[in-house]
Structures are given as structure tokens and as C-alpha cells.
Image (tube, rainbow, N blue to C red):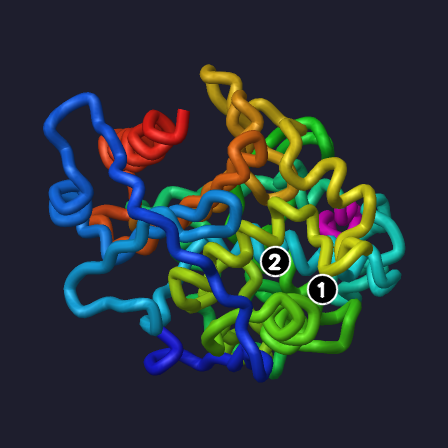
């Protein structure tokens, strides 16, 4: 993706954090599925399982290997969330209850200007948004289509005039546009691109193995907070270990206490199974949580088992109930062996 579209490099440090490799774990499905058939049938390009920071399973397909950079789609939302947790700790963002117009002057006098950082971070702004990937007229399909208006980011041009459909903080609605705004917010508050901030605060100190790239808006050259991060599979897994350690590089966390308390908590229940949403992380009813992206991308973290599972994929559809169930069956097959 970074070779096709404008992108900014996420630079790595001099040294990377090495993984120990243990004997391969063999997931146990309840049918005849195997790792090889799961990957082939679902267009999975790479999977990795870490437990206790040791590689228990790693497999690739179709020429992809541990150095391949793969786009994450909405997994990037959770990475933007992490960077907001850093900015909150450092004081670049004063409070989650600040209004967006305090940081994004284009929103002054607009409905979005009244939305708080917390409401944006939890997708509860109350502003109408259609995330239907198969509808060419949906907001998510149209948000980058208009011509540039000077150097204003596409997403600001599109979203600054959108109106409330619900009272702020009362209604959860999935919106990639709002996570792009999270990216705008962080970049305006810190004066740095998401790529630069990610490199400085996480990629270099946490010892990522490869440089990554983050897509940038063609009008503003600001990174796109809701998508567009391309990295290697092992480095996605390292992000999971950072979350397991609650951001601690040494004795002190890089995240604010409020972020640590709520990012992966069940703040909003969004399905009948008791699952829900925290700060741009999907929370499961067993205490595990995940970052997921269309076409099969996943970063899954289970603190109770000190477990991280990451997956890169090219599902034949952006998503479907069947594909999601197969991904969950893979997680269950890993958990079954560990248990």
C-alpha cells in the first residue's frame, strides 16, 4: 500500500527486541480444519501466536514472510488509540472531556466542535454516519472522494458540517471517519505526524524489527488515523505485548492511568454475546480484547493467558459472519491447546 499511496515511514531503532521460539503449538479445531487448510481456505497470509513473549506458532503463505509489510486496515484504529493514550500522559491532550474545537479549529461553530475527545474515542459522538462498505453512497465510501480544498485534510472537509442524530455520549455507532479525526487530533495536539509520533514513542523504544509505513492524506499530508498502517506480522504482535504490559517500558507506563483503566474495558456493550467496545479496542466477555480490520486482519490479546495472536489476511470479502466465525474458530483452536 505504501508503494501505491502517499505514506510516511515509521522508523525503527538500531536494535530490535528478539523473541524466543518454543516448540510449535498445534491448534485443535473441532472439525478437520488444520493450520494449512485454515490459511488456504480463508486467504490467510500469516499467523503468529505468542505466549509469555515466546513464539509458539508462526506460519506464512504465498511468498509472505517475517519481513513482509502488510496493511492492517482498522487495526490502525487501535494503534491511534494507543498514541492518544501517550499524548494524554504527556499533556499534549489535556483531558478526555475537552471539546474537539479546542484542538481542531476547523470545527469551531460545527456540531463536531462540541463533541468531546472521550466521545470520539468511544464512537459515541451522536453524529450520523454510514459505514456500509458495499454502499457506494455511504459515508465511508465518500469521505475521501471530494477534491482537495487547499491543504485541509479530506476527512475534515467531509465531516466538519455533519450533524447530530443523537445526543453526544448516548449512542454507539461504528465510524472510520471518527478514528481519522482521532489521528487529526493527535497530530494537531503534538505537532507531529502519527508516523513520527509512533516511531518516537513506541516503534524505537519497544524494539520493532522493521520500519513501518502509515498512509497520508493527499491534501494535508497528515496520516490517516483510522487505517493505512503497514507493518510486519511480528511487529503487530509486539504491539500486543506492549498492551499486555500496559505500556510499561521499564517501571513506568507510556500511557496515562485513565487510558490504561479504560482502553480495553467493556465501556459499551455492542452485541448480544456480551462483547463491546473500549477506546477503539473490541472487548470480549472473557476479558480478552482485540484490534480487527476488514479482510481478516487481527491483533488479539488475552491477559489471563499472557497470549497474543496476530493475523494478516486477504479475505475475499471485507467481512462476513462466516469469515468472522472462522477467525474466531482459529482463536478457539489455539485456546483449546493452551487450556
Which residue is at the front of the view, 339 or 314?
A: 339
Q: Tell me which residue sits at (46%, 69%) in the image.
A: 146
The image shows residue 151 at horizontal and vertical percentages of 61, 81
Side of 254 where 102 appears, left or right: right
Side of 242 where 331 appears, left or right: left
Q: Which mark is residue 329?
A: none
Does the magenta-highlighted stretch encompass residue 181? no
- 41 vs 285: above or below: below
- 214 vs 297: above or below: below
Identify the residue position indicated by label 2 in the image: 80
Residue 223 in sight = yes
Classed neighbour count for the residue bearing mark 2: other residues with Cα under 10 Å, few (<14), some (14–19), many (≥20): many
Q: Which mark is residue 186?
A: 1
- 313 vs 128: above or below: below
Q: Tell me which residue sits at (57%, 41%) in the image.
A: 281
Residue 289 in sight = no
Classed neighbour count for the residue bearing mark 1: other residues with Cα under 10 Å, few (<14), some (14–19), many (≥20): many
Tell me which corner region of the image, top left, top right, bottom left or bottom right, holds residue 306: top right
The image shows residue 140 at horizontal and vertical percentages of 44, 52
Q: Tell me which residue sits at (36%, 71%) in the image.
A: 69
Q: Circles 1 and 2: CB distance less than 8 Å? A: yes
Tell me which corner region of the image, top left, top right, bottom left or bottom right, holds residue 336: top left
Q: Specify start and end residues of the magenta stretch as a single range.
A: 109-117
Mark before the other along the chain sequence, 1 or 2: 2
Side of 293 where 223 appears, left or right: right
Which residue is at the front of the view, 156 or 287?
A: 287
The image shows residue 75 at horizontal and vertical percentages of 47, 53
Amino acid at each position: 500500500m505504501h508503494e501505491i499511496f502517499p505514506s510516511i515511514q515509521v522508523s525503527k531503532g538500531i536494535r530490535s527486541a528478539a523473541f524466543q521460539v518454543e516448540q510449535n503449538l498445534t491448534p485443535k479445531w473441532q472439525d478437520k480444519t488444520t493450520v494449512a487448510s485454515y490459511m488456504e481456505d480463508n486467504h490467510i497470509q500469516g499467523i503468529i501466536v505468542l505466549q509469555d513473549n515466546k513464539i509458539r506458532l508462526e506460519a506464512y503463505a504465498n511468498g509472505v514472510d517475517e519481513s513482509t509489510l502488510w496493511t492492517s486496515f482498522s487495526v490502525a484504529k487501535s494503534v491511534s488509540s494507543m498514541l492518544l493514550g501517550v499524548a494524554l500522559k504527556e499533556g499534549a491532550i489535556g483531558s478526555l472531556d475537552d471539546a474537539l474545537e479546542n484542538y481542531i479549529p476547523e470545527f469551531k461553530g460545527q456540531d463536531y466542535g462540541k463533541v468531546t475527545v472521550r466521545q470520539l474515542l468511544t464512537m459515541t459522538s451522536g453524529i450520523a454516519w454510514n459505514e456500509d462498505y458495499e454502499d457506494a453512497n455511504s459515508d465511508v465510501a465518500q469521505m475521501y472522494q471530494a477534491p482537495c480544498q487547499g491543504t485541509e485534510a479530506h476527512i475534515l472537509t467531509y465531516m466538519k458540517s455533519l450533524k447530530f442524530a443523537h445526543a453526544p455520549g448516548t449512542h454507539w455507532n461504528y465510524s472510520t471517519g471518527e478514528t481519522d479525526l482521532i489521528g487529526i487530533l493527535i497530530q494537531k495536539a503534538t505537532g507531529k505526524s502519527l508516523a513520527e509520533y509512533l516511531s518516537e514513542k513506541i516503534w524505537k523504544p519497544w524494539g520493532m524489527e522493521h520500519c513501518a509505513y502509515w498512509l497520508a492524506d493527499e491534501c494535508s499530508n497528515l496520516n490517516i488515523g483510522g487505517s493505512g498502517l503497514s507493518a510486519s506480522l511480528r511487529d503487530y504482535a509486539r504491539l500486543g505485548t506492549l498492551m499486555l504490559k500496559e505500556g510499561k517500558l521499564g517501571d513506568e507506563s507510556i500511557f496515562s492511568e485513565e487510558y490504561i483503566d479504560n482502553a480495553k474495558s467493556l465501556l459499551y456493550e455492542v452485541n448480544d454475546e456480551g462483547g463491546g467496545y473500549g477506546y477503539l479496542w473490541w472487548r470480549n466477555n472473557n476479558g480478552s480484547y482485540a484490534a480487527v480490520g476488514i479482510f481478516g486482519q487481527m491483533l488479539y490479546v488475552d491477559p489471563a493467558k499472557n497470549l497474543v495472536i496476530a493475523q494478516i489476511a486477504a479475505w475475499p470479502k471485507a467481512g462476513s459472519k462466516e469469515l468472522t466465525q472462522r477467525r474466531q474458530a482459529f482463536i478457539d483452536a489455539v485456546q483449546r491447546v493452551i487450556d
